[in-house]
Image (spheres, rainbow, N blue to C red):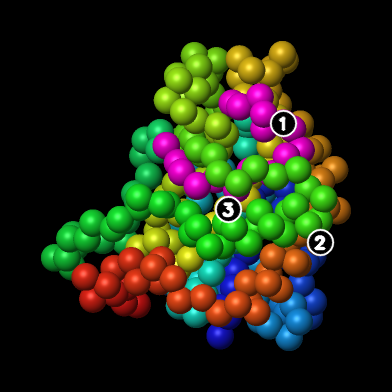
Amino acid sequence: MFEMAVIGGSGLYSPDMLEKTGEAEIATPYGEVSYFHGELNTKKIIFMPRHGKKHSVPPHKINYHANIWALKKLGVKHIIASTAVGSLNKEMRVGDLVIPDQLLDFTKGRSQTFFDGKDGKVVHVDVSSPYCLHLSGILFDCAKSTQLAAHLGGVYVCTEGPRFETAAEIKMYRQLGGDIVGMTSVPESILAREAEICYASFSLVTNLAAGVSPHKLTHKEVYDCMRETNDKLIPFLQKALAKIVQEPLDCECQHALAEFGGFKI
């Protein structure tokens, strides 16, 4: 069984932070899921590339339900998710890490729940704090200790994609309090909460958002920033994973559906 998982976003496609790595597959009610597994300090950890090993799955086509269900089935209690984001906040510069604590959902066509009514069960999960505050604190501390510029707290605006946002949309998101913009935190974070898994994210600012940036946006700048920062991210991730597995945590995230009898698979 695995207690920890890393979900890799754009630019983070392989389990370089782990040792003794291998690949496996698991069947879920939502489809088959492929994942890497490895070890860190003898602890078994999963690495799951969100967009596939070759970044072949766009954000609106990711099988979020299958991914989170698979991690729950494999025994995962803590998820660290990486995302590449654009910045709406000039204090959050290209190359900085942001550990978000809130989100604004502007997705349009994504199912956001495991409980769609087919089994006659209606569930309303609390997402007042959509990211695990304990895991987020560990990520921030480890980022600072590995000399990464990091911001604890920030509002992640999740858009449908796969296109980048318009300048007018970014202006609106800024007026609503958004700090960073990406395409994958919803429904991933929501499903993790329903599955009673602690979930925290670190977002690498790879570009300034439309209307904030002085030039047109390209996917290449996102990829280039991730590649340039990758050598710093690996030690940070290793340190965070080691600290999390050393500190067994039984927080409220793992009892999010207690009033409904818990999450059953």
Q: State the separation of the CA atoms marked 1 and 2.
A: 21 Å
Whether residue 74 sits left or right of residue 4 in the image: it is left
Q: Which mark is residue 93?
A: 1
Mark 3 Cα-neighbour bin, 10 Å: few <14, some 14–19, many ≥20: many
Of 200 and 53, nearer the camera is: 200
Up-down: is 40 above or below 131?
below
Q: Which residue is mark 2?
A: 235
Residue 195 in which image quadrant: bottom left
Image quarter (top left, top right, bottom left or bottom right) of the N terminus: bottom right
Q: Which badge, 1 or 3, is on the more N-terminal residue? A: 1
For the point 73% across and 79% down, which residue is it?
Answer: 39
Residue 14 in which image quadrant: bottom right
Up-down: is 69 above or below 87?
below
Magenta residues, dominant SS class = loop
| Residue 127 coordinates in the image, percent (x, y) | 35, 52
Amino acid at pointer 2: Pro
Whether residue 132 sits left or right of residue 142 in the image: it is left
Amino acid at pointer 1: Arg
Of 110 and 82, nearer the camera is: 82
For the point 50% across and 30% down, which residue is it?
Answer: 178
Of 211 and 121, nearer the camera is: 211
For the point 35% across and 63% down, which residue is it?
Answer: 194
Whether residue 140 sits left or right of residue 129 in the image: it is right
Q: Is residue 102 magenta?
A: yes
| Residue 44 coordinates in the image, percent (x, y) | 66, 81
Q: Which residue is mark 3?
A: 201
Q: Which residues are magenta?
A: 88-104
For the point 53% across and 69% down, which residue is it?
Answer: 78
